[in-house]
């Protein structure tokens, strides 16, 4: 009997030690939820960027939190947000309540991210947005700071700044049209998918284009998932537009570019086309997406700061393609979260939020500085402009996405921004031949008597 009791006691000690060891090991992990539409390129970018960051950090021993090292564990959540906002909120709930994540990165569609944001904020979980652009995500922080202070934007910059950047790209294309074709009054057709994030861009375009000396010939709003845009394109062709200013974050960017190329509309496409940011765009449009210009985040050979090339080349080596902007989860984990945690030595959510709010740091593309509103209230939104986040523009030129902006961008007196590796914009050859053929021949000067 005594032997039995002794054996039982020893077994109990071993069991308790095993449980204690498991609990201790489990406590050495930092759980980060990665949420996004995982069946789409945007969500794949979220996951790939996070995996790359976590692997790099873990390979170096993990995150130094005070006097101990902690590994990162990623947990993937498919938000299915393109199809169903409810699926997105359920995915966020599971990450926080079932998976017990410490932080969340990702999110893409504004309507879904607003709902996911509420869930994360109610649970006081830091959520770094890497996809949605609507300004309301950050104005909430300023208006209701105690509730929303755990939300930060990483990428892209907000929709207002996206429009400003896109206007700069339109201006660059217009300058090329004037220089090559001698057309002074540029006509612009504006096409934006019917989505909440794009709504503020319509009045902005209507107000700003005339001030830029351009004529707005019409506004079209196709569905984000439209597969046929021939009606819109036929109307645009009749409008005589020289520039098609497009705002697409979803799959409509592929059929629009393909059908525009098939019609050989004598105009250049400029703006935001997220589908044109990925390697498969050329194949998906069957080469008809040639000469499309889109706002972008990365281009092979274009150097925005000292971190850009190493990240882009490392990503290409691992995943076989140039990263898209939703890979900003890499920056969210590597530079925002990990560097802040190591700087303050704690996982306390309030202390991390406070420290991150006041940091100025470099990401793979820019210098990140969090803005304040006109009342001096924190927004947790990133500053746009020279010296901070600017983004780039790329153009598809014969199968390659080439960086074409900023190329001597002069947003203010004495400011001239050009990134290493930028190339000139090319007008579609059919546009050049059309306008050179149609342009009236200059009258010969009268001979002197």
Image (cartoon, rainbow, N blue to C red):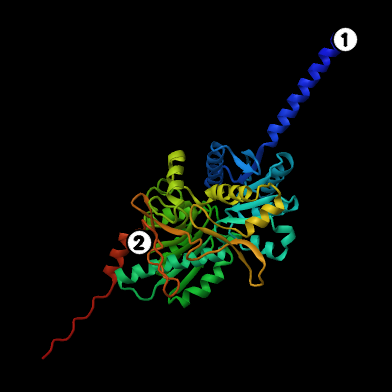
- Residue 114 numbered tag: none
Label 1, residues with CA under 10 Å away: few <14, some 14-19, many ≥20? few
Give the image quarter of residue 150. Answer: bottom right
Locate residue 5 relative to residue 372 in the image: left or right: right
- Quarter holding the N terminus is top right
Task: In this rendered view, identify the residue nearer to me: 389 or 129.
Answer: 389
Viewport quadrant of the C terminus: bottom left
Q: Tally the marks.
A: 2
Q: Position of residue 425 (x, y in %)?
A: 35, 61
Residue drawn where x is 45% and y is 75% of the image: 212
Measured from the top left, where is residue 248 in percent x and y? Answer: 51, 57
Q: Vertically, is 414 above or below 46?
A: below
Residue 116 location in percent, x, y? 68, 51
Q: Earlier in the sequence, mark 2 or mark 1?
A: 1
Nearer to us: label 2 or label 1: 1
Visible in this render: residue 322?
A: no
**Disc 1 on helix, strand or loop?**
helix
| x 71%, y 29%: residue | 22
Whole-percent x, y for residue 363 in the image: 52, 53
Give me the C-alpha separation between circle 2 and circle 1: 88 Å
| Picture residue at 12% right of the left edge, 89% below the top | 448
Q: Secondary structure at mark 2?
A: loop
Give whichever of 300, 102 is nearer the camera: 102
Work out whether residue 367 can be spotted: yes
Q: Which residue is mark 1?
A: 2
Please report the residue visible at 57 percent of the width from the left and 55 percent of the height from the top. 154
Q: Which residue is mark 2?
A: 425
Q: Is residue 101 left or right of residue 391?
A: right
Q: Quadrant of residue 114?
A: bottom right
């Amino acid at each position: 009997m005594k032997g039995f009791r002794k054996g039982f006691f020893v077994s109990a000690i071993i069991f308790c030690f095993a449980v204690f060891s498991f609990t201790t090991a489990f406590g050495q992990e930092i759980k980060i939820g990665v949420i996004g539409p995982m069946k789409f390129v945007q969500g794949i970018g979220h996951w790939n960027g996070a995996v790359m960051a976590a692997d790099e950090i873990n390979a170096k021993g993990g995150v130094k939190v005070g006097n101990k090292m902690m590994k990162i564990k990623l947990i993937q959540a498919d938000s299915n947000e393109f199809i169903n906002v409810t699926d997105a909120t359920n995915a966020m709930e599971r990450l926080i309540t079932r998976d017990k994540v410490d932080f969340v990165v990702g999110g893409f569609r504004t309507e879904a991210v607003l709902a996911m944001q509420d869930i994360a904020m109610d649970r006081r979980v830091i959520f770094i947005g890497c996809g949605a652009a609507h300004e309301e995500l950050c104005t909430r922080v300023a208006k209701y700071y105690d509730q929303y202070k755990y939300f930060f934007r990483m990428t892209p910059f907000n929709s207002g700044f996206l429009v400003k950047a896109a206007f700069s790209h339109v201006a660059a294309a217009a300058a090329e049209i004037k220089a090559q074709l001698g057309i002074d009054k540029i006509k612009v057709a504006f096409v934006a998918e019917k989505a909440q994030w794009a709504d503020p861009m319509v009045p902005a375009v209507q107000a700003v284009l005339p001030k830029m000396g351009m004529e707005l010939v019409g506004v079209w709003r196709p569905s984000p998932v439209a597969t046929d845009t021939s009606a819109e394109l036929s109307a645009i062709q009749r409008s005589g537009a020289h520039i098609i200013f497009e705002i697409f974050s979803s799959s409509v960017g592929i059929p629009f570019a393909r059908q525009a190329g098939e019609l050989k509309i004598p105009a250049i496409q400029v703006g935001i086309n997220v589908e044109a940011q990925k390697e498969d765009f050329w194949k998906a449009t069957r080469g008809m997406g040639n000469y499309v210009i889109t706002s972008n985040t990365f281009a092979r050979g274009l150097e925005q700061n000292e971190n850009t090339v190493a990240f882009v080349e490392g990503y290409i080596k691992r995943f076989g393609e140039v990263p898209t902007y939703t890979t900003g989860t890499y920056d969210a984990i590597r530079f925002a979260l990990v560097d802040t945690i190591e700087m303050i030595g704690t996982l306390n959510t309030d202390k991390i939020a406070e420290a991150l709010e006041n940091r100025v740091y470099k990401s793979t593309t820019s210098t990140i500085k969090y803005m304040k509103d006109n009342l001096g209230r924190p927004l947790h939104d990133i500053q746009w402009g020279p010296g901070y986040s600017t983004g780039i523009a790329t153009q598809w030129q014969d199968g390659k996405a080439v960086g074409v902006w900023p190329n001597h961008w002069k947003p203010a007196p004495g400011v001239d921004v050009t990134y290493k590796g930028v190339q000139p914009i090319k007008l579609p050859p059919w546009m050049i031949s059309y306008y050179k053929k149609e342009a009236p021949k200059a009258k010969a000067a009268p001979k002197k008597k």
